[in-house]
Amino acid sequence: MASHTVHKRWLKVSALVIGFFGPVLTLGTVPATNELARLGLDILTWPVDGFPSYASEEIRFLSALTGGFLVGWGVTIWLLSALVYDAAPEAVRKSVLYGALAWFLFDSFGSITSGQWPNALWNVLVLLLIVGPMWWPAEIKTQTQDGML
């Protein structure tokens, strides 16, 4: 079991892991700044072979949508850590855990059915980074008779 403090810190790690991809994908909408997004997708769709090219308007548009969602999700988790966790630690933990599991299942399913199964393998690593010690509830502190912990 992890402590309340470890969970609260890990929520910020989760927020940064998720949020990191947002600006990268948003920059992918501009041809002059899309190389990191293009290379990232090329790695996720192993082998590294120049696919996808980021040349189509459709992929740039999907990159804009995805980038926005990821930044929003990252900010939401950061604020849950800062504003809500102390009042409802188990509810926040479960919300982030179940949200990450939902992302993992749908993203991995879509990756596999679209022929990009290597991304499902990468998703395992990202899921572990997002969830970390939040797989388990935080230790509950109890007070003794004299008020000491």
Image: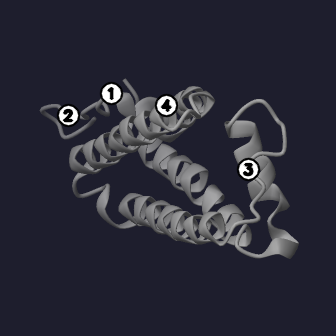
- Say which mark, if any, is on residue 90: none
- Earlier in the chain: of badge 3 and badge 2, it is 3
Dot 2 surroundings within 10 Å: few (below 14), some, or many (20 or more)?
A: few
CA gap, disc 1 and disc 4: 28 Å
The amino acid beneath tag 3 is Pro
Dot 3 surroundings within 10 Å: few (below 14), some, or many (20 or more)?
A: some
CA gap, disc 2 and disc 1: 18 Å
Q: Dot 3 corresponds to which residue?
A: 52
Residue at image location 55% in from the left, 53% down from the top: 18
- Earlier in the chain: of badge 1 and badge 3, it is 3
Above-or-below relation of 88 to 98: below
CA gap, disc 4 and disc 2: 46 Å
Q: Where does the image place residue 14, in percent across and percent down from the top left? A: 51, 48
Q: Dot 4 corresponds to which residue?
A: 112
- Earlier in the chain: of badge 4 and badge 3, it is 3
- Say which mark, if any, is on residue 142: 2
Q: Where does the image place residue 143, in percent across and percent down from the top left? A: 19, 36
Q: Are marks 3 and 2 in contact (CB under 8 Å)?
A: no
Q: Dot 1 corresponds to which residue?
A: 136
- The quadrant holding residue 33 is bottom right
